[in-house]
Image (tube, rainbow, N blue to C red):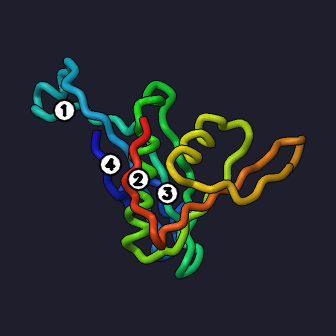
Amino acid sequence: MAVFAMHADVPGAALVIAAPGSCFWVAEATSLADDKTQQETGKPLRTIVGCVALEHKSEQQAELRRMSVDANWQRRGIAAQLCRALLAHAKAAGYDEVFLTTSQAQPAARALYECTGWQETESGKVFWNVSFHKYVYGLKAAVVNKKHS
């Protein structure tokens, strides 16, 4: 699996990350399945299995957006790897912190954020009694290398 930064390579990505300083990553799985085209080209089959975006908000702050991993590829550490890539980039770009919001409908995501150093800073109800949770990851003194699988 490879994690790499994408800018204009994914159709529609620019709509999510239009601001300068923003970025988009995908996680890609490769396999050597029996596929006629693959056999002809000699290249492995490549499948996008996850993505995440970093949206610039200010010189000090960015937002984690659109974290998603294909259901068939969940529970393999892909979201954690995407998150580490995003945080390492954000730190190198000079941001002080990254924040995100999620809901009660994503308990696995909340567990991932909590065990990888994110701090819940706010929660409340939005509509239809659905609660939201805001998390912040401080980058000033953070070492972005925690592993979670």
Q: Is residue 99 visible?
A: yes
The answer to whether marks 4 and 1 mark residues whose Cβ atoms lie closer than 8 Å is: no
Numbered label attached to residue 91: none
**Cα separation between marks 3 and 1:** 26 Å
Q: Position of residue 32 (x, y in %)?
A: 19, 25
Between the residue at mark 1 and the residue at mark 2, the CA separation in whole angstroms equals 26 Å
Residue 15 visible to an observer of this rendering: no
Tag nearer the camera, 4 or 1: 4
Q: CA distance from mark 3 to mark 2?
A: 12 Å
Q: Looking at the image, which residue is at 37% across and 71% down?
A: 92
Q: Of all residues shown, which one is farthest toward the right?
A: 128
Q: Residue 19, image x and y in percent?
A: 52, 73
Q: Disc 4 marks which residue? A: 3
Q: Earlier in the sequence, mark 4 or mark 1?
A: 4
Viewer-closest of 81 and 45: 81
- Choose mark 1 or mark 2, whichever is in front: 2
Q: Residue furthest bottom?
A: 59
Q: Nearer the viewer, mark 3 or mark 1?
A: 3
SS under mark 2: helix
Q: Position of residue 127 (x, y in %)?
A: 87, 47
CA distance separating discs 4 and 2: 10 Å
| Earlier-in-chain disc, 4 versus 2 | 4
Distance, label 4 to label 1, CA atoms, is 16 Å
